Image (tube, rainbow, N blue to C red):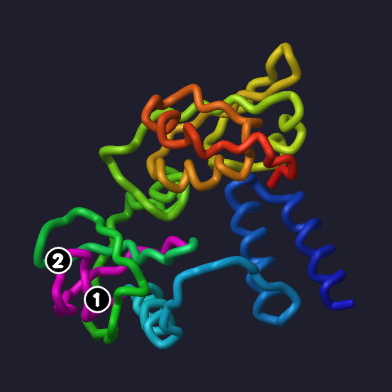
Amino acid sequence: MEVDALRSLRDRLVATLPSAQARSMEVDAEAILEAKGYACRPGPKVKTSPDVLNIVSAALRGPFRLVIRYKGAQDAKPRKRVIEPYGILLGTRHYLIARDAAKDVNLRRFRMDRIENAEITNDWFEKDRDFDLEAYAARSFGSFHSDEEFTRVVWRFSPAAAATAREFVFHPKQEMTELEDGGLMVSFEASGLVEMAWHLAKWGKNVEVLQPSVLRQMVAGFQDARTTVLP
């Protein structure tokens, strides 16, 4: 009964809100269902320390600077970093978006599973008012981001897969174009070509990469015609 009531309330609220607020409410409704034990997210994911996540969450609400021990890809052992947290990207791997004040003003991504320890400080900082987490996240297909990879992406789904593809939001700023043969063309701009290739493998021969050429080469040979069950 509580699940039905929550879903009904969600639907009524979402219907009355602008699109940006509606997306936020949708996420909030899912979070409530998860917190009450009525929903879960199956699938593989990298382990993240609950203690670290709780401390990062508290720092974000300040916002307060964090002292972390972080083991980067090139580090032999964890190093102490003082960072200014801006937000978290959730995915197969969770990434903390933050500035390393000792380096520069650029936003960096810290893998949450590589944070060995985190301590919240009483040192408040002022966030860049122009920062928009949703807009920042939209520059990526998944949780990985690379300015060098950011490019226009165009996929063409076969008529057999078009109906299923229409149900997906591949990217918040995607454009869908109906094709004369019944197929569907999807285009957007983002980085994260490896994560795109992982996803496209699920569609087998029912999707063709038109742009970029490097992504087309990545999926070549991995698209199996025997994949008949669509995502």
Q: Residue at x 40, y 75 (%)?
A: 61
* Element marked by disc 2: loop
Percent x, y of residue 95: 37, 64
Mark 2 to mark 1 CA distance (whole Å): 9 Å
Q: Residue at x 42, y 36 (%)?
A: 218
Q: Residue at x 17, y 75 (%)?
A: 81
Marking on residue 169:
none
On screen, residue 142 above or below 148: below
Task: Give the magenta-colored segment's residue range.
Answer: 64-90
Q: Quadrant of residue 35?
A: bottom right
Residue 84: say if magenta. yes
The kind of residue on which mark 1 rests is Arg
Q: Which residue is label 2 attached to?
A: 101
Residue in front for this viewpoint, 125 or 165: 165
Q: Residue at x 34, y 78 (%)?
A: 59
Would you say 142 lies left or right of 44 here?
A: left
Q: Residues within 10 Å of mark 1 (few under 14, many from 20)?
A: many
Would you say 76 lies left or right of 54 here?
A: left
Q: Quadrant of residue 2?
A: bottom right
Q: Earlier in the sequence, mark 2 or mark 1?
A: 1
Mark 1 and mark 2 in contact (Cβ < 8 Å)?
A: yes
On screen, residue 214 above or below 16: above
Percent x, y of residue 60: 37, 73
Marking on residue 65:
1
Percent x, y of residue 37: 71, 81
